[in-house]
Image: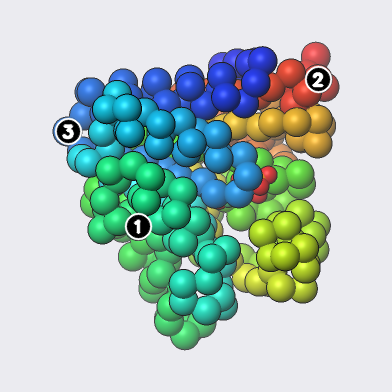
Amino acid sequence: MEVVIVDRPGDGAALVAGAIAALVALRDAPVLGLATGGTPQPVYDRLADDCSAGRLSLAGASAFLLDEYVGLPAGHPASYRQVIEREVVARTDLRSEAVHAPDVAGEERELPAACARYDDAIDAAGGVDLQLLGVGSDGHIGFNEPGSSLGSRTRLKTLTARTRADNARFFDGDPEAVPHHVVTQGIGTILAARHLVLLAWGDGKAEIVARLVEGPVSASVPASALQLHHHVTVIVDEPAASRLE
Ligand code: F6R
């Protein structure tokens, strides 16, 4: 695991944009794994700038989202599909048809089959080349909350009260408006990507960054499973790095 400490999130975003540009130059049909939440925003801003300036094209790329809320009305602005449409598709040349999100539209009983189809679609695309990740204050990656199996695949999960409180800022500050359920790639699904890039900014993430990088691998800190992967880059700013030994 490589840990890179940057002065500002924008510097980390430039590193990620550079890695994506290198991938695009190397592969005809690169596959990106996209996260949502606040953390990847500087990366999406940078990708937008690079595409507008003609320094980067994502026209040949495809993307798989890490997770999606269950139960939001279609087109809800906080749905992760909508976030990626707004922050990436509308501002770069990544094609909307090339962006895949977990299918949460059916009845609950149809979700297991839809989840299996999502894992199959990732495999059929050749697997994810570069997976962006944030980390929850409780150590979740994707929405694999503490206790999630380290070998899990895409499936339905229930959010903890802490994660719903953390994400209330995307729902007008109302934790009750945050759905209870999500479909998320499993930890096993995430670990199948060829390169994992986890980002964290600010002192609110300092403790969990130290636990995921230096603590024991444990299902109680799902992000610690990254220690099992052969190609991981953790990019943090100084405040998020402040508890590292
Ligand atoms: C989002 C996701 C989550 C977030 C995590 C951190 O697609 O999978 O794991 O990365 O909740 O969220 P922020 O970045 O808002 O602190």
Give the camera-side residue of 171 and 211. Answer: 171
Give the camera-side residue of 7 and 24. Answer: 7
Alpha-carbon neighbours of circle 2 within 10 Å: few (<14), some, or many (≥20)?
some
Q: Is residue 35 left or right of residue 62?
A: right
Secondary structure beneath dot 1 equals strand
In three-dimensional space, the C-alpha distance between marks 2 and 3, rounded to whole angstroms, equals: 39 Å
Which label is found at residue 64?
Answer: none
At label 3, the amino acid type is Asp
Give the camera-side residue of 74 and 114. Answer: 74
Secondary structure beneath dot 2 equals loop
**Where is mark 2, residue-wise?**
242
**Where is mark 3, residue-wise?**
28
Residue 112 location in percent, x, y? 45, 73
At label 2, the amino acid type is Ser
Q: Is residue 106 left or right of residue 126?
A: right
Quarter of the rendering occupied by the N terminus: top right
Alpha-carbon neighbours of circle 3 within 10 Å: few (<14), some, or many (≥20)?
few
